[in-house]
Amino acid sequence: MRDAYLVKKLSKEYQWLPTVYSNLSGYIHFSDSHIFSSIEEVDSSNNSIKFAIEETDTKFSEFSWLELIDCFNVTIDIFIEYLEGWIFTKDNPELIQQLKNKRQANNCMHEEIRIRNNS
């Protein structure tokens, strides 16, 4: 399973997720996000680039770091919720099968109704 698939599936419930994923996923693995965010100056007259690696962040406000931490915490909460659901399904296979059967029966009933209404 890939992270892009999870983002697509979960974006129905968490509309903010695709934007956060798009903006931050490049920082998970070493990528162009790391390189471009550290560029301080580009001088096209001599084809040079000046990078800044500093102890204090001057490009991003403190709020952006707090927002990042908040997004991470919410993401962990979502993961824990799905993990608990997975554990429940593994601990209750008979109940899960009953729920699947009930859902399938409801889907069949809705399909029958749809066919009748179109006839």
Image: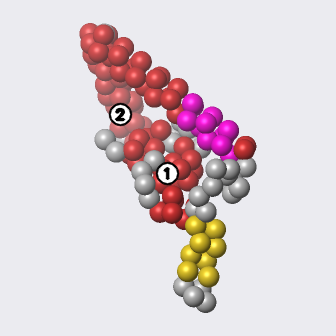
The residue carrying mark 2 is: 111
Residue 59 tag number:
none
Residue 27 tag number:
1
Write down the region rendered in magenta. Answer: 64-74
- Percent x, y for residue 87? 35, 16
Please state if 77 lies on the left or on the right of 41 as rendered. left
Residue 44: quadrant of the picture: bottom right
Q: Earlier in the sequence, mark 1 or mark 2?
A: 1
Indicate whether residue 69 is drawn in magenta.
Answer: yes
Please state if 33 lies on the left or on the right of 5 as rendered. right
Q: Secondary structure at mark 1?
A: helix
Q: Amino acid at mark 2?
A: Glu
Q: Is residue 95 visible?
A: yes
Marks 2 and 1: in contact by CB < 8 Å? Answer: no
Up/down of 83 relative to 67, above or below: above
Q: Amino acid at mark 1?
A: Tyr
Indicate whether residue 105 is drawn in magenta.
Answer: no
**In the orientation shown, which residue stands out farthest toward the bottom?**
45
Predominant secondary structure in magenta? Answer: helix
User: What residue is shown at x 26% (from left), y 10% (from top)?
Assistant: 94
